[in-house]
Image (cartoon, rainbow, N blue to C red):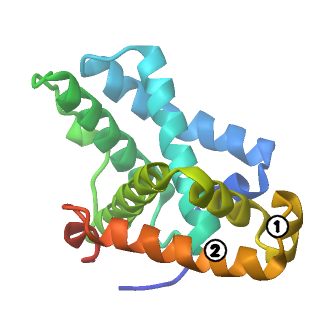
Amino acid sequence: MSLKKHSDHKYIEALLQNDNRVLNELYQKFSGKIILYVTKNSGSYDDAQDVIQEVLITIFHQANERNFTLTCPFDAYFFLLCKRNWLNKLNKKGIKKVTILEEITSITDEQEFLVQETEMYEKRTALFEKKLIELGGKCKELLDVSFKLKNMEKVAAFLNISYGYARKKKSECMSKLTKMIKSSSNFNSLTTM
């Protein structure tokens, strides 16, 4: 698979830099297909807006945390993510009747791979967040602060604890969180790709 950055990677960069001009262009060019798809498939305009926002947030987080590189046209990648997001929502509501509008865009293997990668990222993140909540208490607080502040000296100062204790406790909490994640019933399905 080619790792050459596609010219549409500008939309990923615009998300990361909160470039309103390019984000407006993205919205103008690509939201119409999503709105049409959702409204033709048991949804409303507001549902489509929610799907668009959720997918953009997922793409932003993936690009921010994993240095994601778009190697295919944004149009098909974005549409397929939004489509799957909406179909998952319909499935959760028990709605099975869907008008498929496949002629809107054709999907290449590369685009399918990027979409699967993004969906896998989303599932891993959801599992991590769920287990972090289950971890609870002081461990959750310490990890939340350390994810935000990054620097352990700042974390220790913020939590009013010693630097040594903060480092030791973070290591213990991460170990506990890792065990919780690995013992999850769907962990193995999220490690292959």
**Residue positioned 52% across, 83% down in the render:** 4
Inspect the image, locate mark 2, and give the three-letter code of the amino acid beneath it.
Lys
Report if the CB atoms under discs 1 and 2 are less than 8 Å apart: yes
Q: Which one is nearer the viewer's eye here, 30 or 69?
A: 69
Secondary structure under badge 2?
Answer: helix
Secondary structure under badge 1?
Answer: loop
Marks 1 and 2, how far apart in space? 10 Å
**Residue positioned 61% across, 34% down in the render:** 28
Asked whether residue 83 appears in the rendered view, the answer is: yes
Q: Which one is nearer the viewer's eye here, 129 or 94?
A: 129
Inspect the image, locate mark 1, and give the three-letter code of the amino acid beneath it.
Ile
Which x, y percent locates residue 11?
Answer: 63, 56
Disc 2: which residue: 169
**Residue positioned 34% across, 63% down in the render:** 120
Q: Is residue 153 above or below residue 86?
A: below
Q: Quadrant of residue 91?
A: top left
Q: Which quadrant of the figure contains the C terminus? A: bottom left
Disc 1: which residue: 161
Q: Residue furthest left?
A: 96
Q: Give the label on residue 46, or none.
A: none
